[in-house]
Amino acid sequence: MPSPEPIKFTDGAAYERFMSPWSRSAGTLFLDWLTPGSGQAWVDVGAGNGAFTELLLAKSAPSSVCAIDPSDAQIATARQKFAGKPVELSIGDAMALPYDANRFDIAVMALVLFFVPDARKGASEMVRVTKPGGMVASYTWDIVRGGTPTQPLWEELDALGIPAARPPSADISRFEALKALWAELGLREIETRELVVERTFADFGDYWLSMVVSSPSGVIAKLSESQGAELKSRLQARLPASATGAITVHASATAIKGRKVA
C-alpha cells in the first residue's frame, strides 16, 4: 500500500465538527492548569480555526493574542469569529514565527506540536518569542499510548490494510520526550500533566459525520464503496452505545509548561 498523504487542515467547517469540541474540552483543562492570570500577551501557534483562541479570550482575559496557522482556510474561518476582538491573525510557519524575540508573556501550542515536522524547531521558536520569565506550554494527544480521539478510526483502517496518516512528530507526545525537549531549550520550572477528556455523540451517525466524514485525511474519498461499508460496520460494532444510542469516546493528552530564564 502507498504511504498515506500528510494530514492537512484545509476545511474550517469540517474541522469545527471534527476536532473543535475536543480542543475546547482539553483546552479548558489546560488553561485551568496554566493559571496564567489576566492581561497577558499570548501567541497561539497553530491556532487553526480559533477554537483554543476562543477559550483564551473567554477564560484568561488576555491583553492581546497573536494567532497563527499555515492554513489560509482555517484562518479565514477564524477571522469570522474574532471581528473586533484583540486577536491578530496571521498565516505562517510554526518553525519560522514572524514575531520579534521576547514579545509575548505566554506562548502555547494547542494540539499542534506533533504536527510540526521539526518539533524542536517549533518549540525553540516559541521560546524565542517569549519574554524572559514568560511561560512556554503545549499539549498534544498522547498518540504513542493510544490517547488520540482518532484511535478507533486509525486502528480499524489499519485492520483493513489501509494506512492511516499519523502526525509526523508523534513521538513528541510522550512525556519523556516533552520533558527532555523543554529542558534542552533551557526552560525552568517544568511541569507536566495528563489531560483526560470525553465527548458524547448523539448516535453513530453523529460520530460517523464528525470523526470520519469530517476527518482531514479525507479517508472516505479514498475508500471503495465496499471498504467504506466495512469500515462503518467495524466502527459501529466497536463503539458501545447507550440505551438512547449515544456514543461516548475518551481521549488523553500530554501537557507541559515551563518558564524562560529571566
Image: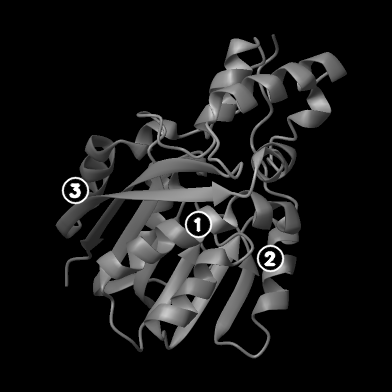
Of labels 1 and 3, earlier in sequence is: 1
Packing grade of label 1 (10 A; few <14, some 14-19, many >=20) is some
Give the x, y percent position of residue 70: 64, 55
Q: Nearer the viewer, mark 2 or mark 1?
A: 1
Which residue is most to the right? 225
Disc 1 marks a residue whose amino acid type is Ser
How many numbered discs?
A: 3
Residue found at x 72% / y 41%: 205
Residue under label 2: 75
The kind of secondary structure element at disc 1 is: helix
Residue placed most toward the observer, 211 or 101: 211
Q: CB under 8 Å between callouts 2 and 3?
A: no
Packing grade of label 3 (10 A; few <14, some 14-19, many >=20) is some
Which residue is most to the left? 189
Horizontally, residue 7 falls left or right of residue 40, namely right
Of labels 2 and 1, earlier in sequence is: 1
Disc 2 marks a residue whose amino acid type is Ile
Q: Which mark is residue 23?
A: 1
Give the x, y percent position of residue 153: 59, 28
Residue placed most toward the observer, 200 or 255: 200
Gap in angstroms between the C-alphas marked 2 and 1: 16 Å
The kind of secondary structure element at disc 2 is: helix
Residue under label 3: 183
